Amino acid sequence: MLQKVSLKARTGGQILVDQLLIHGADTAYCVPGESYLEVLDALHDVQDRFKLVNARHEAGAANMAETYGKLTGKPGICMVTRGPGACHAAIGVHIAQQDSTPMILLVGQIARETTDREAFQEIDYRAMFGPIAKWATQIDDPARVPEYMARAFRVATSGRPGPVVIGLPEDMLTEVVSVPDARPYSATHAALSAENLAMLKTQLVQAERPLMLLGGSGWSDESAAAITRFAETNQIPVATSFRRQDIVDNLSPVFAGDFGTSTAPSLYAHQREADLLLVIGARLGEMTTKTYTTIQSPNPATRLVHLYPDPDEIGRVYSPDLGIAAAPVSVAAALDGVDLGRAQAWGGWCETLHADYLADTEAPNGGEWDLDMGVALAQLRDLLPDDVVVTLDAGNHTGWAQRFLRFGRPGRIIGSTCGAMGYSVPAAVAASIARPDRLTLSFVGDGGFMMSGNELATAAQYGGRPIVLLFNNGIYGTIRMHQERDHPERVSGTTLQNQDFVKMAEGLGAHAERVTRTADFADAFARARDSGRPALIELVTDPEQISTRTTISKLREAARKKAEAGQR
């Protein structure tokens, strides 16, 4: 059907908002600024079709948009003002780039006539964001807004998804022109051809101990279900990349665990034992290879088949035996229903890996600690709804969720894979506003909460009801762990003097309480869930329990033994 062409005279700001609607955008996250007032004014006329969420900080707004992109597969839209606003929002662009998340950051810009004079808040956004965005540009002619916005949506969603940054000179937004709108965009993805599928099957049937590694972005609920059916039909064990555990139901008999910061030692051993590694959608980066040590570069000892949406990523570090440019949805659809006839041969291998995963996620006894979150989460996990959304910050505290909770579609795990602190609370706020019918849990440390916990006020304003689980151990835990490992008992810069988190959260409009004992967690969680508003549970944990797998005392003892061995 031909699109109706509108030649009505409009401002650049009105044209831009019309393009957002044409391309299916329904939400944007912002901190308002005078540099893009025309956009804000145009949004006033479409409030019945478009939700504008004003966050409390540009980093929070950018993280909310990035979360929306993860949750929906559509570009998350963020709007910030020039200079400081853009700098604050840069973290969201970095996360979107490393996490392969579709996102569009719209930045107000100085007037065109003042360019290159170091005008108030002037920054060249092409130069600033060029290294961390998929595309960074500026629209200087309002007549080209439809062209640029259509391209922005396509770039953000096609191939390997990622962030687009667009500068919007304030005088361009006020200029009035007549220009036709663009057609609604469609993303372009590489598909798995019949020839490539045949080569993939040939590689698989030759294996004795295959292991699939799934990850990256672009997995729909349907494609996740399809790839799970393929794995279960053929009894191929499946691991996932960092914070992508929701691709496969963790209780499926094929699930083997995840490669990230809480990986079981047994899974690393099985990765070395595998004679074929089939990677679909995931990058072979630092997390999936234990800092490039479990797979040899450039020629892995294990046969490697890598399917990834961007051909430039295939072979970047590891030369595969077979590399295919294909989107995960295409691969999953092609493999759905395929029976390779090797299930009996692979069944024992698959059973071993899943059994090791279950053993690693058994609840600890908890007797050593007043509050043991491994015990608490193991008690909680079977009570959570199937569609729960879990958002994760950076830090060792996330290990308890990653190790002891179960994930799987339609539930989601949403976290920054680039290790950005301050991500989880804005992410939970965005997820709760976008999906108000779902339970949303945020895992955050005391350090990360102080970076973005103010966004609880945004949740209260827009009806979001996330439950924030705040791990308070009075330290920057991950850095203290590395500090004690490399420089034992020489604490420097990692101690936090915290204030009253309960009063802070209450002041932001949230239900809040403090938990110090394992036995009290379940009841506190129930009260938070029943409160009908944003909620925070402060979890006072012992800094000695530095992660799910070690303690500060053990780190110091290992460092002492290493030093003694070096002196001999």
Image (spheres, helix red, strand yellow):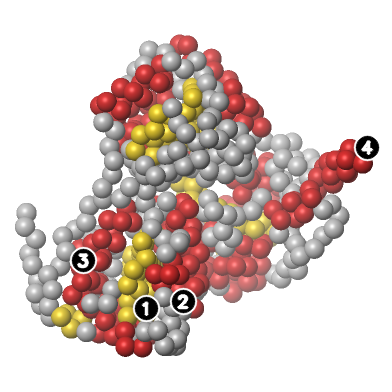
10 Å neighbourhood of mark 2: few (<14), some, or many (≥20)?
many
The answer to which of 511 and 482 lies nearer the viewer is: 482
In whole angstroms, how far apart are the C-alphas of marks 2 and 3?
25 Å
Left or right: 336, with 255 as reference point: left
Q: Earlier in the sequence, mark 4 or mark 3?
A: 3
Position above or below: 356 against 178: above
Residue in view at x 70 percent, y 70 percent: 500
In whole angstroms, how far apart are the C-alphas of marks 3 and 1?
18 Å
Mark whose residue sits in front, 4 or 1: 4
- Residue 108 numbered mark, or none: 1
Pointers 2 and 1 in contact (C-beta within 8 Å): yes
10 Å neighbourhood of mark 1: few (<14), some, or many (≥20)?
many
The answer to which of 24 and 312 lies nearer the viewer is: 312
Callout 3: helix, strand or loop?
Answer: helix
Mark whose residue sits in front, 4 or 2: 4
Callout 1: helix, strand or loop?
Answer: strand
User: At which x and y percent is residue 465?
Assistant: 48, 61
In whole angstroms, how far apart are the C-alphas of marks 4 and 1?
63 Å
Identify residue for label 3. Answer: 147
Q: Earlier in the sequence, mark 4 or mark 1?
A: 1
Pointers 4 and 3 in contact (C-beta within 8 Å): no
User: At which x and y percent is residue 105?
Assistant: 38, 67
Callout 4: helix, strand or loop?
Answer: loop
User: At which x and y percent is residue 138?
Assistant: 32, 72
Callout 2: helix, strand or loop?
Answer: helix
Q: Earlier in the sequence, mark 2 or mark 1?
A: 2
In whole angstroms, how far apart are the C-alphas of marks 4 and 3?
69 Å
Q: Earlier in the sequence, mark 3 or mark 1?
A: 1
Identify residue for label 2. Answer: 85
Say what amino acid the circle numbered 4 marks.
Answer: Arg
Say what amino acid the circle numbered 2 marks.
Answer: Gly
